[in-house]
């Protein structure tokens, strides 16, 4: 995984690598964008968990439009927006965001799928993990897990002082 801000036009608004990884760890959701063929692009908000290495995991139903599209095209982007604040009298917004680029892997082994569900529970329901694991086992047959293999990450921000 490479942190690379070289393609960002506004080099004065770069998000540090540390801030980007913090956002990747703490953000609640992001928007997954997939090429949609004749239908055009497809973007969908999803919650996620980063494994703190080179992958992001998502869970979803075992069928649907995003899975059909990903079977045809595995290259995706994932946009995460952190704190924002509209400043009306200055006609601007402060923000922090990252863009993740990579390829999506489907049809993961059962062990990896369960590990991903545990990571999701650690992030979103840490105080209810025991019950969450029971639920994960019970609904495992109707839960798909996707893994985004990260190629690159870039980050941008605008602070109130700008």
Image: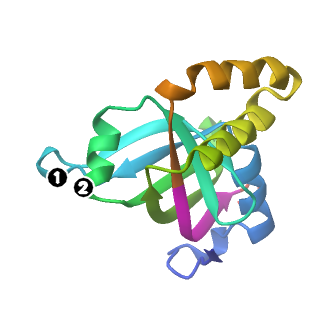
Residue 137: say if magenta. Answer: no
**Residue ranking furthest to the bottom:** 6
Give the camera-side residue of 128 and 2: 128
Give the camera-side residue of 111 and 81: 111
Instruction: State left or right for residue 21 relative to residue 55.
Output: right
Q: Residues within 10 Å of mark 2 (few under 14, many from 20)?
A: few
Label 2 vs 1, first from the N-terminus: 1
Q: Nearest to the eye among marks 2 and 1: give it.
A: 2
Q: Which mark is residue 72?
A: 2
- Secondary structure at badge 1 equals helix
- Secondary structure at badge 2 equals helix
Query: Real-space Cα distance between discs 2 and 1?
Result: 9 Å
Q: Position of residue 47 (x, y in %)?
A: 59, 36
Which quarter shows the C terminus? bottom right
Which residue is rendered at x = 56% and y = 66% of the image?
A: 150
Which residue is rendered at x = 65% and y = 25% of the image?
A: 136
Which quarter shows the N terminus? bottom right
Which residue is rendered at x = 49% and y = 65% of the image?
A: 101
Can residue 83 be seen from the camera position used here?
no
Q: Are marks 2 and 1 in contact (CB under 8 Å)?
A: yes
Q: Position of residue 15 (x, y in %)?
A: 70, 66
Please state the extent of the stretch shown in magenta in the rendering: 148-158
Residue 149: say if magenta. Answer: yes
Instruction: State left or right for residue 10 relative to residue 51.
Output: left
Instruction: State left or right for residue 87 relative to residue 9.
Output: right
Give the camera-side residue of 161 and 35: 35
Give the camera-side residue of 153 and 65: 65
Instruction: Name the residue that disc number 1 marks.
Output: 37
Quadrant of res 134: top right
Quadrant of res 121: top right
Q: Which mark is residue 115?
A: none
Quadrant of res 11: bottom right
């Amino acid at each position: 995984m490479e942190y690379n801000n070289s393609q960002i036009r506004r080099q004065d608004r770069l998000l540090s690598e540390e801030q980007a990884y913090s956002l990747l760890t703490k953000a609640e959701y992001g928007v997954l964008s997939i090429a949609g063929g004749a239908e055009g692009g497809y973007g969908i908000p999803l919650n996620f968990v980063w494994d703190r290495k080179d992958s992001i995991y998502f869970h979803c139903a075992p069928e649907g439009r995003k899975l059909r599209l990903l079977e045809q095209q595995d290259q995706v982007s994932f946009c995460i927006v952190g704190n924002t604040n509209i400043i009306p009298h200055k006609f601007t917004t402060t923000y922090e965001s990252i863009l993740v680029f990579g390829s999506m892997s489907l049809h993961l082994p059962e062990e990896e799928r369960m590990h991903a569900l545990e990571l999701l529970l650690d992030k979103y329901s840490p105080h209810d993990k025991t019950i969450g694991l029971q639920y994960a086992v019970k609904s495992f047959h109707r839960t798909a897990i996707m893994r985004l293999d990260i190629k690159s990450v870039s980050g941008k921000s605008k602070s109130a002082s700008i």
